[in-house]
Amino acid sequence: MPPQLIGAETVAKIKAIKGTLVTLECDVSGTPQPRITWIKDGSVIEISNHPHMSILNDGKTLQVSLGS
């Protein structure tokens, strides 16, 4: 089955408050399981360069700590 991004036609604006944790989800399906790449400002997010970010759930979840 080809990869499918579920809800790709939906665009959401997210507002966050400083000092909170923001969680972004990428809901995909396919066989074999698609590999997810998170991109910021046109570049792949390297977690080692962004200690305030975490990638979880086999890459489907990006968490960003907005600090205090």
Image: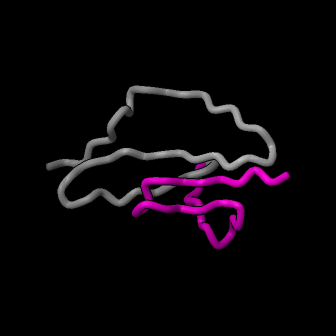
In the image, taking residue 40 as reference, residue 9 lies left or right, namely left
Where does the image place residue 30, in percent across and percent down from the top left? 22, 51
Residue lying furthest left: 1
Q: How is the image coloured?
A: one colour
Q: Residue at x 60, y 28 (%)?
A: 13
In the image, taking residue 6 as reference, residue 32 lies left or right, namely left
Of 27 and 39, nearer the camera is 27
Residue lying furthest front: 20
Residue lying furthest right: 68
Q: Residue at x 27, y 42 (%)?
A: 4
Of 57 and 34, nearer the camera is 57
Where does the image place residue 1, in percent across and percent down from the top left? 14, 49
Q: Is residue 31 magenta?
A: no
Q: Residue at x 49, y 27 (%)?
A: 11
Where does the image place residue 16, in percent across and percent down from the top left? 71, 37
Where does the image place residue 38, in percent across and percent down from the top left? 51, 54
Number of marks in picture = 0
In the image, taking residue 17 as reference, residue 38 lies left or right, namely left
Magenta-highlighted residues: 42-68
Residue lying furthest bottom: 48
In the image, taking residue 19 as reference, residue 21 lies left or right, namely left
Q: Is residue 59 magenta?
A: yes
